[in-house]
Amino acid sequence: MDRWTAMKAHYLTPLFQPRSVVVIGASETPDSVGALVFRNLLDARFKGRLFGVNLRHPKVFGETVYTRISAVPKGEVDLAIIATPARTLPALMRECGERGVRMVLVLSRDFVAVDAPNRALLDEAIAIAGRYGVRVLGPNLLGMMRPAAGLIAANYHGKVKPGNLALVAQSSSVATAILDWAEAHDVGFSTVVSLGAAADVNFGEVLDYLSQDSATRGILLYLEDVGEARGFMSALRAAARQKPVVCLKVGREHTGSDRATRTHSERLIGRDDAFDAALRRTGVLRVPTMVHMTIAAQMLAANIRTKGRRLAVISNGYGVGRMAVDRALALGVELPKLSPTTVARLDAELPTVGTHDNPVDILGDAPPARFLAAAEACLADPNIDGVLVILTPQAGTDDLATAERMIELRGRTDKLLMLVWLGDKRIALSRKLLDRAHMAYFLAPEHAVEAFASLAAWSYVQELSLQTPGPLASRSEPDVESARRVIAQSLAAGRSILNTAETLAVLEAFHIPYPPTLLASTPDEAIAAASRVGLPVALKIDADNLLHKSDIDGVLLNLNSLEQVADNTESMLAYARQRLPKDSVKGMVVQKMHGKRHGRELMVGVTRDAVFGPMIAFGSGGLTVDVFEDVAVTLPPLNDMIAANLIRRTKVARALGAFRSHPPVDMDAVKDVLLRVSEMVCELPEMQQLDLNPVVVDEYGAVAVDANMIVAPLPEDFHRYSHMAVHPYPAHLVEHGQLKDSTACVFRPIRSEDADELQRFVREELSDESRFNRFMSTLKQLPPGMLVRFTQLDYAREMAVVATVEVGGQAQMVGVARYTANPDAASAEFAISIADRWQGKGLGTQLMSALFNAARDARLCTIEGDILASNTHMLGLMKKLGFDIRPHPDDATLKWVVKSLS
């Protein structure tokens, strides 16, 4: 467990694994919240010590309990559950602190009012808790549950079955509905947490704990809103890389605002688009309903997977097969044609009557052997990732024997085999058999296809979450400083919308192609400009603070003569000065027509989400951009894979290939524009919105025909990349050095693709003693979970710097140093490993220096760590680097080393 997660888990242990609990109520009736919680704990046979405090009548809880907290044994209570009015909370919090309570669960619901007195009471109570080191969950919540431990600390009347799924919900009412549904469908939970107002313990901390909880195999989330994006993304990514996380979120409405003050990108992107994009980058699967959520989570927790979204359907009835096909088409699940080899195999083994392509109809009287032959053939097809077998009980079918064949077949394939046994009474026995064998079987074809779609989507978002693009693409570097100067000049002049010349200068700095363009303020200048760029040309009004030129008829295309240029320049300028403030109209933009006979019009844009920051949009462009609303969005930074997926999720993607007389477009040119825009987002944090519309692309390349950009000053506390929800690969931290023997060495942040090389380094480059000194265990290689944690980093809160040298033409890892920021966000704990044969060459000093630079870049003030007292060589290096070496407060076999980074 990394230190960040370990420390947060340590904080929350009294909540999730309390040894003793006190319930504090203030009611005169047995039906009070406090009395209900107390009875829930008794009925569930809570495995720890249970105390009760009722401030009014001691026997309301059903047993003799205390009437004041001071009577509770000091230092013997981990968790206090408070169900009293808001006005009592500050005093109770103080008493809890004085009695040594470590965690408080506040069920009080009268904080729901947002008036100042209640807010002040809550703030006072949280401040008091902080002074005593007490953590607080709530208020305004259902409660929390650990059913296996009998911890039902909630205002809930139903039964909750133990299981391996955790539920984290922002809404008490929805949590209650999910629990009621789960009870009816025999779904159990390891943990249930209702977050309430989250005045102290937050969403990220709960997820950090659950990601390491051995009782939890999968996590279900119900969300209504998101707070701080970095913490949200960080917690989700950390949890999703450990176990499946499935999310149900409400709020898909598209909020509107004034069209005139918005770019096309901002109008087309809603809050829900941003949330979807964020989940895709964290490896979390989003589902539309509670049923989808639990089915997906159960399958993922059972380690049922698919490697792709290509499905084959086999059924002994045409109608039920079509049910599956229709649902697959609606969900975008691919139903590819079977290979000729597979079709020939089916022709040889199945009756000539029926359909031997996808879907495969094996007829109503199909015996078990026919089901098996069809399933074996489809599973062997290289075009298929999963097979769905649907059985209806008809004359000639043997559902039990067929189930036995399917169970046996499942053990012989690495592809997903899903089953639907339709009916009820006649197939009850075979369903029980499938259940005991833990087969992926469903009661309806639609449910099976929906589950397959969810598994395919999860597989993709897992792959997407591993992508760590850098801020700059591996092409010609942009002139970032020139672009920043242009923006600075506009802001200094009090303008947030860049004019045409400034926008083109920024595009040029980032190597985004645009047609030859000149500015003109009079008809004569327009004629001269048209002569220079060459006919035909387009004319566009150039005016301050004008985003949509077409709204004032400010665009005219395909002018083929200089006379047309002169006449239209004069009339367009006159009309613009009537519609706009006269001083704002600067003149005309004279631009050569792109001349792309097979061109397709696209839109590439950037907008800012209030929570997740910059979003990149791609879709169909031109005048109809707002009509068709064909747009897909993603979070930057991008790489080739992310850009390709962004394109693929739009309808216009189908027009980019060959059709009719149009050849396919240059897809590399489209992706290049997207990657350049990603660079702009990373390196120009002042950019709030960007529209490249249209971007015209054909078989020869892409050009941005029109562009608008809105900028804003940076906040005083701005830190590099802090405007982005996904931290780019920190390429600016790459350093080059030379060891004592003149060997060239590269020091760089680790990437997810370094996993194999890191495993080789630990297994082959470290001796048993070095591995023990680093990991304080006798492991020979890194377990899979640890390897994932060590290479799939969240650069916002952790860093690993690897040292590589060239050996035999390949870069080999010879050292690793890492830190993990502590929850105080000011200090970090570090660790370092140096390959045995590379020690004594000055590598450790340079590697730690690179780690110090990364920590300073993250604004950390102190770096600290544990070192075995017997590791004299490492202690010597620490002394040389200026660390203060102290006795360890908890373990005499360790030394505690601390260094200030100021």
Image (cartoon, rainbow, N blue to C red):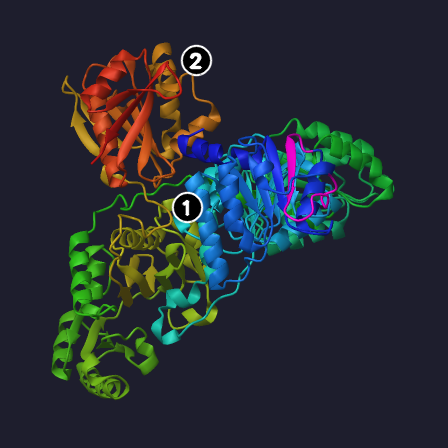
Q: Is residue 80 left or right of residue 559?
A: right
Identity, as a three-letter code, of the amino acid under mark 2? Thr
Query: Residue 382 or 731: which is nearer the viewer?
Result: 731
Secondary structure category for the residue under label 1: helix
Residue 301 position in % (x across, y down): 60, 36
Q: Which mark is residue 231?
A: 1
Identity, as a three-letter code, of the amino acid under mark 1? Gly
Query: Residue 626 or 526: which is nearer the viewer?
Result: 626
Q: Which mark is residue 572?
A: none
Image quadrant in which you'd find residue 516 = bottom left
Residue 10 position in % (x across, y down): 47, 32
Residue 809 to residue 125: above or below: above
Identified at 24% across, 59% down, the residue is 513
Q: Which mark is residue 778?
A: 2
How crowded is the residue under tag 1: few (<14 C-alpha within 10 Å), some, or many (20+)?
Answer: some
Identified at 12% across, 77% down, the residue is 528
Q: Is residue 871 left or right of residue 123?
A: left
Residue 480 position in % (x across, y down): 19, 52
Secondary structure category for the residue under label 2: loop
Which quarter of the image is occupied by the C terminus?
A: top left
- Please state the extent of the stretch shown in magenta in the rendering: 46-63
How crowded is the residue under tag 2: few (<14 C-alpha within 10 Å), some, or many (20+)?
Answer: few
Say whether disc 2 or disc 1 marks the residue closer to the N-terminus. Answer: 1
Identified at 23% across, 60% down, the residue is 507
Asked if residue 57 is among those painted magenta in the image, a careful observer would answer: yes
Asked if residue 47 is among those painted magenta in the image, a careful observer would answer: yes
- C-alpha span from label 2 to label 1: 34 Å
Q: Can residue 651 be spotted in the picture?
A: no
